[in-house]
């Protein structure tokens, strides 16, 4: 670690040092931080305030250890374990009509994950849809809008969201804290997300790497809007209740992104596409996320 600190350029660790400096910074990044803190926003909106208004919220000391993962914390997957999980998924859920679109890497297609009424409830639980991020920033490569289905909106507390979360985690055999909050998406005609990869979490972050993406369509689409995997020659057409599950890292090396699962959301030509992502991590995501003390829960740190 001393060499890493003293020889940043030689060790090609400049980006890492920049990220760490940002994570530990005791400063306010918005001119309204003081007034927000006085009205109780540090308690009401900790995930934003404790990061962006660290000084005003008096959270400088806590922030120093906010990105630390306890040494005794065990990962919820081991090298070689993905194969068994995916194989089990193809046989143990007949009601979901599972189809293996690929086995190297695994890409599974599911049906009947959610009913029309349930999908409508899930979309309605989102109060607002904002421009989607590509990674952790706005970009012309992604033009959809999104809603984070978390505590702030109250969306996460709805019965259908918890039911769907449990159903998906039953397939992947991961505990509830390891899943992110649902990202609910809306694609209007012309909207798309160009080729990208979902693994953006450094293995050293509290939550570890994103192991899996479990994606579900919340509507039919009249034309366009498919999910395309260029490296695999696979395109999945939108259908209400249909889901796709794939890994973001190699089974034999959970620290390394499997670039074969790069994918894109093809442009919607006619109709509106609603869908949702449930990203799942090697370690607990929700506990450090709730604390609001670590910037790396929502920032691209996989450099």
Image: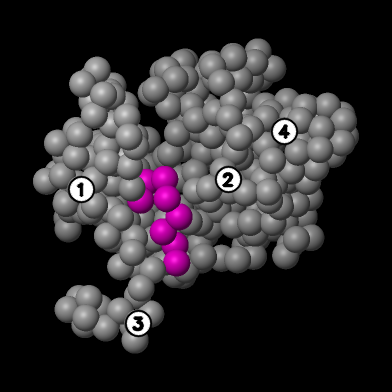
Q: Nearer the viewer, residue 68 or 249?
A: 68
Quadrant of the rendering where the N terminus is positioned: bottom left
Q: Is residue 259 left or right of residue 289?
A: right
Say what secondary structure mark 1 lies in.
Answer: loop
Q: Nearer the viewer, residue 163 or 204?
A: 204
Q: Is residue 144 left or right of residue 168?
A: right
> What segment carries the magenta color?
296-303
Circle 1 residues within 10 Å: few <14, some 14–19, many ≥20:
many
Circle 4 residues within 10 Å: few <14, some 14–19, many ≥20:
many
Q: CA distance from mark 1 to mark 4?
A: 38 Å
Q: Nearer the viewer, residue 199 or 163?
A: 199
Q: Is residue 75 above or below residue 218?
A: below
Residue 138 image label: 2
Residue visible at 22% across and 40% down?
A: 54
Residue 279 image label: none
Residue labelled with disc 3: 9
Circle 2 residues within 10 Å: few <14, some 14–19, many ≥20:
few
Q: Is residue 238 above or below residue 16?
A: above
Disc on the earlier residue, 1 or 3? 3
Q: Is residue 58 above or below residue 159?
A: below
Question: CB under 8 Å between callouts 1 and 3?
Answer: no
Task: Look at the image and tell me whether residue 55 can be seen.
Answer: yes
Residue labelled with disc 1: 26
Rendering coords of residue 82 (x, y %):
49, 57
Disc on the earlier residue, 1 or 2? 1
Residue 187 image label: 4
Q: Is residue 44 above or below residue 202?
A: above
Residue visible at 81% across and 38% down?
A: 190
Answer whether residue 75 is magenta in the image: no
Which marked residue is nearer to the observer: mark 3 or mark 4?
A: 3
Disc on the earlier residue, 3 or 4? 3
């Amino acid at each position: 670690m001393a060499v890493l600190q003293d020889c940043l350029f030689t060790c090609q660790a400049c980006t890492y040092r920049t990220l760490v400096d940002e994570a530990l910074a005791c400063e306010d990044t918005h001119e309204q931080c003081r007034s927000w803190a006085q009205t109780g926003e540090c308690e009401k909106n900790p995930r934003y305030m404790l990061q962006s208004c660290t000084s005003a919220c008096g959270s400088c000391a806590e922030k120093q250890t906010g990105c630390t993962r306890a040494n005794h914390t065990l990962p919820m997957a081991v090298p070689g374990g993905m194969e068994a999980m995916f194989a089990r998924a193809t046989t143990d859920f007949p009601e979901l009509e599972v189809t293996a679109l690929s086995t190297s890497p695994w890409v599974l297609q599911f049906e009947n994950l959610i009913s029309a009424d349930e999908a409508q409830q899930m979309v309605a639980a989102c109060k607002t849809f904002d421009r989607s991020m590509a990674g952790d920033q706005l970009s012309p490569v992604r033009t959809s809008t999104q809603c984070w289905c978390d505590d702030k909106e109250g969306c996460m507390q709805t019965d259908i969201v918890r039911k769907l979360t449990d159903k998906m985690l039953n397939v992947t055999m991961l505990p509830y804290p390891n899943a992110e909050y649902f990202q609910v998406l809306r694609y209007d005609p012309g909207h798309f997300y160009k080729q990208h990869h979902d693994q953006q979490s450094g293995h050293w972050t509290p939550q570890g790497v994103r192991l899996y993406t479990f994606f579900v369509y919340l509507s039919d689409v009249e034309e366009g809007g498919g999910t395309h995997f260029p490296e695999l020659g696979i395109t999945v057409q939108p259908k209400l209740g249909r889901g796709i599950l794939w890994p973001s890292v190699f089974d034999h090396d959970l620290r390394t992104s499997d670039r074969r699962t790069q994918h894109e959301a093809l442009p919607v030509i006619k109709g509106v596409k609603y869908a949702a992502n449930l990203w799942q991590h090697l370690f607990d995501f929700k506990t450090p996320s709730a604390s609001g003390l670590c910037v790396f829960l929502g920032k691209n740190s996989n450099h």
